[in-house]
């Protein structure tokens, strides 16, 4: 390997399921970039040593996925404000001196997905209901607060985790019991599922939607299947729906630009390539 050809990767354990290689591979081919993007399975025990080696191997950066998003914060030499606030990073840049800069683009991807696929969506239209309080929820909450959402209703199976997010991010977040998640949808303008419920191999998200207004926007971070049961039921009510694939596509844009020097487009051809890959 040589530094004349920039290398990037996605690190995780497991990693074979990742669609990021198909995503970045499409862009590399489209823009004629002489670079490579590869999936690498790295255990938690080997993560620190592997990251230290990557710049010397010709890597200019990498994406990070489960279970390493939190660990790389402490292994990086500098951390963006948003990654520090979220407490996790998904995009690393290796600088010429070998130092590592960590950023989190998940919130950016979430907002850009809504702006592209629901261009009339306005975060200040009304209350936003968010399901889940894990790492994905943290990125979504930060992005919604930055976008100007004035009321975020948050429900999580373990209420204490939701309460911790409220203490951390402020009084615009109002915590509801999980068993009352259906009731908290009354008058909501936006509903976001950040849990893994509804994903292939996981249980269905059994949240009643009878209180949800028919003009609400509903989005699910799950993209396998592309239309989850939640999105299907919301569409049957007449709600606008946005699937989670666009978040994956948009969160990749900043990293590709930093590593390969080209700001890529998110279009139908990219979606098709990722779904096929």
Image (cartoon, rainbow, N blue to C red):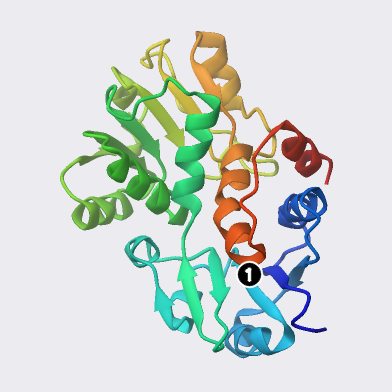
Horizontal side of residue 35 vs 184, given as left or right: right
Would you identify the image quadrant in which residue 177 lies?
top left
Residue 70, x across and y down, in percent: 47, 70
Horizontal side of residue 75 vs 227, given as left or right: left
Residue 267, x across and y down, in percent: 68, 34
**Residue 206 visible in rendering:** no
- For image coordinates 42% across by 45% down, the residue present is 132
Q: Quick check: 42 above or below 267?
A: below
Q: Secondary structure at mark 1?
A: strand
Horizontal side of residue 152 vs 256, given as left or right: left
- For image coordinates 51% across by 80% down, the residue present is 100
Mark 1: give few (<14), some (14-19) or many (20+) Cα within 10 Å: many
- For image coordinates 81% across by 65% down, the residue present is 34
Q: Is 10 in front, or is 194?
A: 10
- For image coordinates 27% across by 35% down, the residue present is 149
Horizontal side of residue 45 vs 105, given as left or right: right
**Residue 101 visible in rendering:** yes
Q: Quick check: 130 above or below 18?
A: above
Would you identify the image quadrant in which residue 37 lies?
bottom right
Would you name the residue on which mark 1 appears?
62
Q: Quadrant of the N terminus?
A: bottom right
């Amino acid at each position: 390997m040589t530094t004349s050809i920039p290398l990037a990767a996605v690190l995780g354990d497991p990693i074979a399921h990742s669609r990021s290689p198909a995503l970045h591979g499409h862009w590399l081919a489209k823009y004629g970039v002489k670079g490579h993007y590869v999936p690498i399975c790295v255990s938690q025990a080997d993560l620190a040593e592997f990251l230290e080696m990557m710049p010397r191997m010709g890597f200019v950066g990498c994406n990070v996925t489960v279970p390493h998003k939190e660990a790389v914060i402490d292994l990086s030499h500098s951390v963006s404000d948003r990654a520090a606030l979220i407490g996790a990073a998904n995009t690393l840049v290796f600088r010429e001196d070998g130092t590592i800069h960590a950023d989190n683009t998940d919130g950016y991807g979430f907002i850009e997905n809504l702006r592209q696929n629901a261009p009339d969506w306005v975060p200040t239209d009304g209350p936003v209901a968010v399901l889940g309080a894990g790492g994905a929820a943290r990125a979504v909450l930060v992005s919604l607060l930055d976008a100007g959402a004035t009321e975020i209703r948050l429900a999580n199976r373990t209420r204490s985790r939701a309460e911790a997010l409220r203490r951390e991010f402020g009084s615009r977040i109002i915590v509801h019991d999980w068993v009352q998640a259906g009731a908290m949808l009354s008058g909501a303008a936006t509903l976001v599922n950040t849990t893994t419920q509804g994903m292939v191999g996981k249980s269905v998200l059994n949240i009643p939607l009878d209180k949800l207004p028919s003009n609400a926007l509903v989005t699910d971070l799950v993209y396998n299947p592309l239309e989850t049961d939640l999105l299907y039921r919301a569409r049957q009510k007449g709600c606008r729906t946005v699937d989670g694939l666009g978040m994956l596509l948009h969160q990749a844009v900043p990293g590709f630009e930093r590593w390969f020097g080209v700001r890529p487009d998110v279009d139908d051809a990219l979606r098709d390539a990722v779904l096929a890959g």
